C-alpha cells in the first residue's frame, strides 16, 4: 500500500541560533509539536538527524532520508550559526490523518503563530506525493516536489491538501476540509 510523503519548508525571520525569545519559543513549541505528531494515528515516520544535534541540518547524517537539501529560493545561511529555516520530511498512511495532525491541537496553535516566526516568501510551504510501500523519501525528493508545485501547481506528482490526488493519480478531496485556498508563507 502506498504511503504519503510530506515535505514542509519555511524561511525563519532569524537564525536558529539567535538567542531572541521568539527563536526559543519556536524551538520549544516545535519540540512539543514533534512529540504530539509522532503519536498521531496515521503517522509513520519522519526524518531525524542520527546524532540528534539540535540546529544542525546541513552536513548532518540523515540516514536513509538522504543529504539535507533546500529549495533554490532559500538564500540565508547554511552553518549552525546562520541557518534560518525549518523543514520537515515525514511519512503518513493517508491524507486524512495528515490533515487532522496539521490542522488540530498543538500544531494548529503553532500554525496560528507562523507569521511571528516565518517570512512570507510567496512560495508554497508544503507538498505531498505518494511513495511505494517501503520507500523512504529523501530531502532532495521533497525539494524537487516543492519546486515542481511552485512552478506547475498541484498535480499527482506534487500536491496540496486543497488540490490533492489519490495514489492512482485521480483527484480527491478530504471531506470537511475547510478553506478552499492553500496557505502560502
Image (cartoon, grey):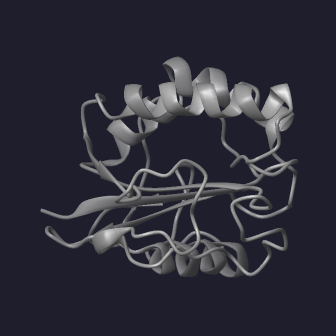
The spot of residue 61 in percent (x, y) is 40, 70
How many numbered dots are placed on residues in this image? Answer: 0
- Residue at 45% in and 38% down: 99
The spot of residue 36 in percent (x, y) is 39, 25
Q: Is residue 19 left or right of residue 78?
A: right
Q: Is residue 174 left or right of residue 9?
A: left
Q: Nearer the viewer, residue 156 or 172?
A: 156
Q: Quadrant of residue 87?
A: bottom right
Q: Is residue 135 above or below residue 57?
A: below
- Residue at 82% in and 43% down: 18
Q: Nearer the viewer, residue 39 or 84?
A: 84
Q: Nearer the viewer, residue 65 or 81?
A: 81
Q: Is residue 38 above or below residue 131?
A: above
- Residue at 51% in and 31% down: 31
- Residue at 87% in and 52% down: 120
The spot of residue 183 in percent (x, y) is 72, 46
The spot of residue 164 in percent (x, y) is 47, 58
Q: Quadrant of the N terminus?
A: bottom left
Amino acid at each position: 500500500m502506498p504511503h504519503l510523503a510530506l515535505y514542509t519548508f519555511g524561511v525563519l525571520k532569524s537564525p536558529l541560533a539567535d538567542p531572541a525569545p521568539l527563536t526559543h519559543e519556536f524551538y520549544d513549541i516545535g519540540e512539543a509539536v514533534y512529540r504530539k505528531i509522532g503519536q498521531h494515528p496515521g503517522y509513520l515516520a519522519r526524518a531525524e538527524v542520527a546524532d540528534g544535534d539540535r540546529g544542525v541540518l546541513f552536513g548532518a547524517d540523515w540516514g536513509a532520508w538522504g543529504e539535507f537539501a533546500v529549495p533554490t529560493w532559500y538564500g540565508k545561511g547554511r552553518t549552525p550559526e546562520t541557518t534560518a529555516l525549518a523543514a520537515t520530511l515525514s511519512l503518513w498512511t493517508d491524507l486524512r490523518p495528515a490533515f487532522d495532525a496539521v490542522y488540530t491541537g498543538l500544531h494548529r496553535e503553532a500554525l496560528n503563530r507562523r507569521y511571528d516566526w516565518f517570512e512570507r516568501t510567496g512560495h508554497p510551504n508544503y507538498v505531498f506525493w505518494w511513495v511505494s510501500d517501503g520507500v523512504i523519501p529523501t530531502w532532495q525528493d521533497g525539494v524537487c516536489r516543492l519546486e515542481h508545485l511552485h512552478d506547475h501547481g498541484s498535480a499527482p506528482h506534487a500536491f496540496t491538501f486543497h488540490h490533492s490526488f489519490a495514489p492512482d493519480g485521480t483527484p480527491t478531496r478530504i471531506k470537511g476540509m475547510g478553506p478552499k485556498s492553500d496557505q502560502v508563507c
